[in-house]
Image (cartoon, rainbow, N blue to C red):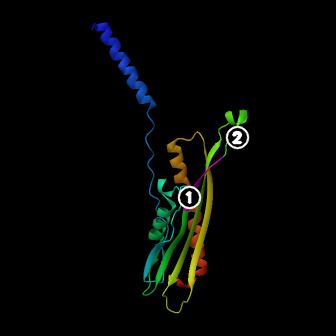
């Protein structure tokens, strides 16, 4: 092989390598763990805090296990970070009844309008339902607080995997920003005598 042919071959391989590296997808984003340690503790007049997970996703529409941080994980973190036992008897049961996120494929417009418009291809519906129920507390027969939060978000048909995962993370974060003040207010309203 002549020197000229060798130079051309090296140049061609260099161009191919650059083209391939230019087509590589961007690195997957890293998502923080949603924690709530920056918020003050809510100390309850019970001996222990127990997390009870009643949520059982059913069906292929549920996508919680594909999310970077699922609402279920975020709720568990909230209970661990914000609730504190400060009594000698009884238990506060933090009951997750729903931490669902479902995916619905949307119908897209056809024709010229559809061809020249970036359309929304999927909708994600989230539903949180949580109870904080106190049991075994002396002189208290029934004491509980609750918070329910729903949110929906759509995703464009041109969204990359990274954009989709960022949207899922933002959805969980938004849910928890709605949930925290609701549950905190419900505890202050319905369990005021049992908050230390």
**Residue 101 lies in the magenta-colored region:** yes
The mark closer to the camera, 2 or 1, is: 2
- Give the main secondary structure of the magenta stretch: strand
**Residue 151 lies in the magenta-colored region:** no
Comes first in the chain, label 2 or label 1: 1
Above or below, 98 relative to 43: above
Rendered location of residue 40, percent (x, y): 49, 70
Q: Is residue 54 left or right of residue 146?
A: left
Tell me what residue is drawn at x 40 percent, y 22 percent: 16
Q: Residues within 10 Å of mark 2 (few under 14, many from 20)?
A: few
Q: Can residue 195 be seen at all in this image of the molecule?
A: no
The stretch in magenta equals: 100-106
Looking at this view, name the residue that lies furthest to the bottom: 139
Q: What secondary structure is marked by label 1?
A: strand
Give the residue number, with chain letter if any, for mark 1. Answer: 101
Q: Which mark is residue 177?
A: none
Q: Residues within 10 Å of mark 1 (few under 14, many from 20)?
A: many
Rendered location of residue 2, percent (x, y): 28, 6
Rendered location of residue 19, percent (x, y): 43, 25
Looking at this view, name the residue that lies furthest to the front: 59
Residue 184 versus residue 162: which sits nearer the camera?
A: 162
Q: Residue 142's quadrant in the figure?
A: bottom right
Q: Is residue 18 left or right of residue 168?
A: left
Q: Which mark is residue 109?
A: 2
Tell me what residue is drawn at x 43 percent, y 80 percent: 48
Above or below, 109 relative to 150: above
Q: What secondary structure is marked by label 2?
A: loop
Give the quarter of the figure containing the N terminus.
Answer: top left
Q: Residue 152's quadrant in the figure?
A: bottom right
């Amino acid at each position: 092989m002549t020197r000229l042919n060798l130079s051309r071959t090296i140049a061609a391989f260099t161009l191919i390598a650059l083209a391939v590296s230019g087509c590589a997808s961007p690195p997957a984003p890293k998502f923080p763990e949603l924690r709530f340690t920056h918020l003050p503790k809510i100390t309850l007049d019970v001996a222990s805090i127990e997390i009870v997970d009643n949520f059982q996703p059913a069906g292929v529409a549920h996508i919680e296990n594909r999310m970077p941080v699922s609402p279920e994980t975020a709720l568990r973190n909230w209970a661990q970070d914000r609730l504190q036992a400060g009594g000698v008897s009884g238990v506060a049961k933090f009951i997750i009844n729903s931490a669902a996120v479902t995916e619905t494929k949307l119908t897209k417009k056809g024709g010229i309008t559809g061809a020249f418009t970036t359309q929304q291809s999927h909708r994600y519906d989230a539903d949180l339902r949580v109870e904080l129920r106190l049991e075994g507390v002396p002189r208290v027969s029934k004491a509980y607080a609750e918070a329910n939060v729903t949110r929906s978000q759509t995703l464009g048909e041109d969204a990359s995997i990274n954009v989709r995962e960022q949207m899922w993370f933002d959805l969980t974060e938004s849910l928890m920003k709605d949930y925290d003040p609701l549950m905190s207010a419900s505890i202050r309203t319905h369990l005021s005598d049992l908050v230390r």
